Image (cartoon, rainbow, N blue to C red):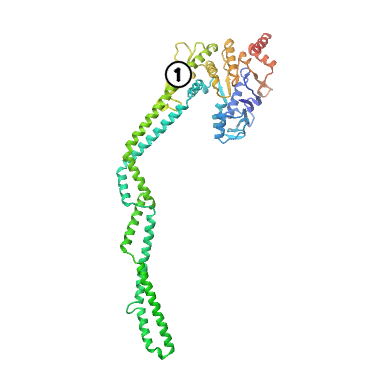
Amino acid sequence: MLTALAIRDVVLIEALDLEFGAGLDVLTGETGAGKSILLDALGLALGARGDSGLVRHGAKQAVVTATFDAPAGAVAALLDDNGIAVEPGEPLLVRRIVKADGGSRGFINDQAASAGLLREMAPHLVEIHGQHDDRGLLAATGHRALLDLFGRIDTSVATAAWAAVRAAETALATARADIETAARDREWLEHTVAELTALAAEPGEEEVLADQRRTMQRAEKITDDLAAIDDYLDGSDGGLAKLRQAARVLERIADDHPALAEALAAVDRAVIEGSAADDRMREARAALAYDPRALEDDEARLFALRAMARKHRVQPDELATLTEEMRGRLERLEAGEGGIAKLEAQVAQAHAAYATEATRLTKARAAAAARLDTAVAGELAPLKLDAARFRTALAPLGVDGWSGAGKDRVEFEISTNPGAPFAPLIKIASGGELSRFILALKVALAEQGGAATMIFDEIDRGVGGAVASAIGERLARLSQNTQLLVVTHSPQVAARGRQHFMIAKSHDGTVTRTGVRALPEAERREEIARMLSGATVTDEARAQAARLLETA
């Protein structure tokens, strides 16, 4: 509910602070007094186009702040989705600033907010019904939801059934696409599976083969080196043979001098150590012995693994997994037709379940539409629309329009004259008729809720007497469940107000200003008397105004 409206420097309004309460608040004033400025200011706070022409002449900027009750429901969800924090129980302050040189800024509880967010939030806060309103009840897109609310029609089962249809259709489309892709690649797939299966790669095999290859390559080099050492030690010209020859010569002459005996001992030790080294090298050669063919086989296998991995752009260790994946694709292709048939059966079952639920919704809507038509028809005659007819038109949607809410298109239509064809409200109703049709609909749909605040702008234009009284009575009835702000020229409507605001212009010789003030009871009677009699207020008009207030 709108609790306050603060306006600074908007057109002719210099400074204005208004407080609103529950029920019916009426706004009156002479033609041209500036009632539209008030609505323009509220619209600005709720995200309307920020035109610099709204800034009062000589001011730097215009500021409008609308205060609402603590946010709940859809408004609270929108704020949460957009990261705007409002403390529990704290009122909602929506502020819009428009600068004289262009540009605007929006705020929600002093946190920056885009005009887009304000516009998205606005329908949940305020419904504005005026002479040229093309939103709310006139938008056919919302008629089905309104009818469902009126008829208390639960669409949750249909929503679940439609979700099952979409899931089954998606699964079928995915399976068909996979099979179609696999079928195009069948020959390649069969060849790939054959060569991967023939290769029979195992996880970790590449590392084992690489280690074996390095070992054999090292052994080959060591064996060559040992062969060269063997040439140095063994053989007729090797080092050991020379040492043994030297030892034999020393044996003959060792007794001739003590130093020669020592030399012989040293040579003998060298022969022993050399022989030991020769023995160790023979052992090493035996241990390092390998089959050159094994190295060739190892390298061939290693190179084959790496080549296959490069071909498929994977690591060698991933070849085993790739083999299983390719084999699985081939198996799915071969078993695909059976799987498609099963998925097609599931789609058919889902559609049948959805069709059953959609049919139930259609029947329920037809019954609710008949009740709504009767309810609206009962409101038309008192509103001087007795020649008009109203109907809730149901029509089947094309497949593209099906949804969790069923298969029905719902639109409110009217015929304004006997024999005239039915058509959407906005296309054939005049401004005054349109507002009264909206009022009739709102009364019929009163229990179904909507925005916490509704504004009717000159709904009583062009009517008076009994019709104006009927409009006032219905507005008062609506205001029992929601807050209504009504801009009116009708004394019968004004008398119904819980609170009465008067809008007037003032002049100080140089500047014209628009002001708004809440009227106390005595002044309220005077204003209603003015509305009854015109420029000159008579005692008869005052008496009639008093009777209207007393009756209301």
Crowding near pointer 1: few (<14 within 10 Å), some, many (20+)? some
Q: Quadrant of residue 447?
A: top right
Identify which amino acid the numbered label 1 is placed on.
Ala
Instruction: Judge by depth and name the residue closer to the eye, 497 or 312.
Output: 312
Q: Is residue 536 visible?
A: no
Q: Quadrant of residue 471?
A: top right
Instruction: Judge by depth and name the residue closer to the eye, 189 or 22.
Output: 189
In this picture, is 294 found above or below 130? below
Residue 493 position, x and y percent, is 61, 15
Quadrant holding the C terminus: top right
Name the side, left or right, on which 391 lies relative to 1. left
Q: How many marks?
A: 1
Q: Is residue 528 visible?
A: yes
Write the residue at 36% across / 45% down: 325
Residue 192 position, x and y percent, is 32, 47
Q: Where does label 1 land, which residue?
A: 366
In this picture, is 353 found above or below 179? above
Name the side, left or right, on which 420 lies relative to 2. left
Instruction: Judge by depth and name the residue closer to the eye, 248 or 375.
Output: 248
Residue 16 position, x and y percent, is 66, 26
Residue 437 position, x and y percent, is 52, 16
